[in-house]
């Protein structure tokens, strides 16, 4: 947030010109100065919230609604390096009650930012909605952002749909561990500039498209189900009725993947 203002002869603000780094829309800012603190009220078509400043305490940033616009392309990041030095930021406690990203619906975001010698430490990061919960932390420097954490959901199908991804897998419970990094600030993340590792653990699900060839044969998925020795007792208890289900079912499925410039690779 950049604010330019003018003072009258008594030291009161009489003009404000405000711009918000995360939005091209103009922001209206109102400043209230009290005996022991100050409070900024921020309003724009994409943003509504406040910044509460108390001496020697972390700034409290409370946003009722924020629409995140599209992040710049990787080529734009290289041409216009980050102008903000995160080590110069004050300590911040951030809460966004309605965080809108694309078509995913409203998210709730919480985080604590603390300046360090190399930049800013991100802790107590929580991002959640009615589909998934993400927790973690990381580091933000002048060159890049690094985050580690976990993501959990019991609605994997809806999550895939919200990210416009194909519904290639189903599971009752999904757990993801991630360690990711990208050039620039936290808000400059895109799929195309992501690097890092992902570890997944899924329980009680299926790969519906395995063995879905258009033929009258048994299909690869059903053969895999039938040959699963660990599930033989379960097949017997169901009189092999579960073999007629489409795809390849599983009780537990784990994997490790690498992300390189947004492409997923399976380590050798």
Image: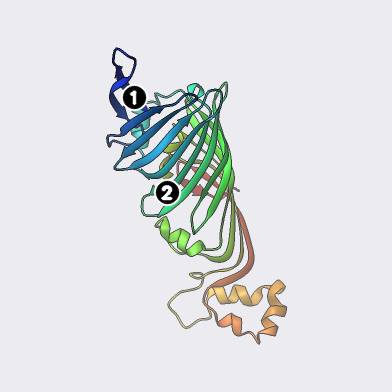
**Residue that sits furthest to the top in the current view:** 9
In this rendering, position of residue 268 left or right of residue 35: right
From the viewer's side, name the closer residue of 136 and 57. Answer: 57
User: Which residue position is annotated with label 1?
Assistant: 3
Seen in the picture, residue 196 relative to 141 is either above or below; the reply is: below
Question: Circle 1 sits in a helix, a strand or a loop, which is it?
Answer: strand
Locate residue 261, reporting x and y percent: 45, 41
Quadrant of image for the N terminus: top left
Locate residue 138, reporting x and y percent: 57, 36
Seen in the picture, residue 173 relative to 234 is either above or below; the reply is: above
Name the image colouring.
Answer: rainbow
Locate residue 266, reporting x and y percent: 56, 50
Q: Residues within 10 Å of mark 1 (few under 14, many from 20)?
A: few
Locate residue 267, reporting x and y percent: 59, 48
**Residue that sits furthest to the bottom in the current view:** 239
Residue at the (53%, 73%) spot, across then down: 247
**Is residue 165 visible to us here?**
no
Residue at the (66%, 84%) spot, across then down: 238
First reached walking from the N terminus: tag 2 or tag 1: 1
Q: Residues within 10 Å of mark 2 (few under 14, many from 20)?
A: some
Q: Quadrant of residue 192?
A: top left
In this rendering, position of residue 217 left or right of residue 190: right
- Spatial CA distance of label 2 from label 1 is 24 Å
User: Which residue position is annotated with label 2?
Assistant: 98
Question: Circle 2 sits in a helix, a strand or a loop, which is it?
Answer: strand
Residue at the (40%, 26%) spot, across then down: 82
Mark 2–mark 1 contact, CB under 8 Å?
Answer: no
Q: Quadrant of residue 174?
A: bottom right
Seen in the picture, residue 253 relative to 198 is either above or below; the reply is: below
**Is residue 249 visible to us here?**
yes
Label at residue 65: none
């Amino acid at each position: 947030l950049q604010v330019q203002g003018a003072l009258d002869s008594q030291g009161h603000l009489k003009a404000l010109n405000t711009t918000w780094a995360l939005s091209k829309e103009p922001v209206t800012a109102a400043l209230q100065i009290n005996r022991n603190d100050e409070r900024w009220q921020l309003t724009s078509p994409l943003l509504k919230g406040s910044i509460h400043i108390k001496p020697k305490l972390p700034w409290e940033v409370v946003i009722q609604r924020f629409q995140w616009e599209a992040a710049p392309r990787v080529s734009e990041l290289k041409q216009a390096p980050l102008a903000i030095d995160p080590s110069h930021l004050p300590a911040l406690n951030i809460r966004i009650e309605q965080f809108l990203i694309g078509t995913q619906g409203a998210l709730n975001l919480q985080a604590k930012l603390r300046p360090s010698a190399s930049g800013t430490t991100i802790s107590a990061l929580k991002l959640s909605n009615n589909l998934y919960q993400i927790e973690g932390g990381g580091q933000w420097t002048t060159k890049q952002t690094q985050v580690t954490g976990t993501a959990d959901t019991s609605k994997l199908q809806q999550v895939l749909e919200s990210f416009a991804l194909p519904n290639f897998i189903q599971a009752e419970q999904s757990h993801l561990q991630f360690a990711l990094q990208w050039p620039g600030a936290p808000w400059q993340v895109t799929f195309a500039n992501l690097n890092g590792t992902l570890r997944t653990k899924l329980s009680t699900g299926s790969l519906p498209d395995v063995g879905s060839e258009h033929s009258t044969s048994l299909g690869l998925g059903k053969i895999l189900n039938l040959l699963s020795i660990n599930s033989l007792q379960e097949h017997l208890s169901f009189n092999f009725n579960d073999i007629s289900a489409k795809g390849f079912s599983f009780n537990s499925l784990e994997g490790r993947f690498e992300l390189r410039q947004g492409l997923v690779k399976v380590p050798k």
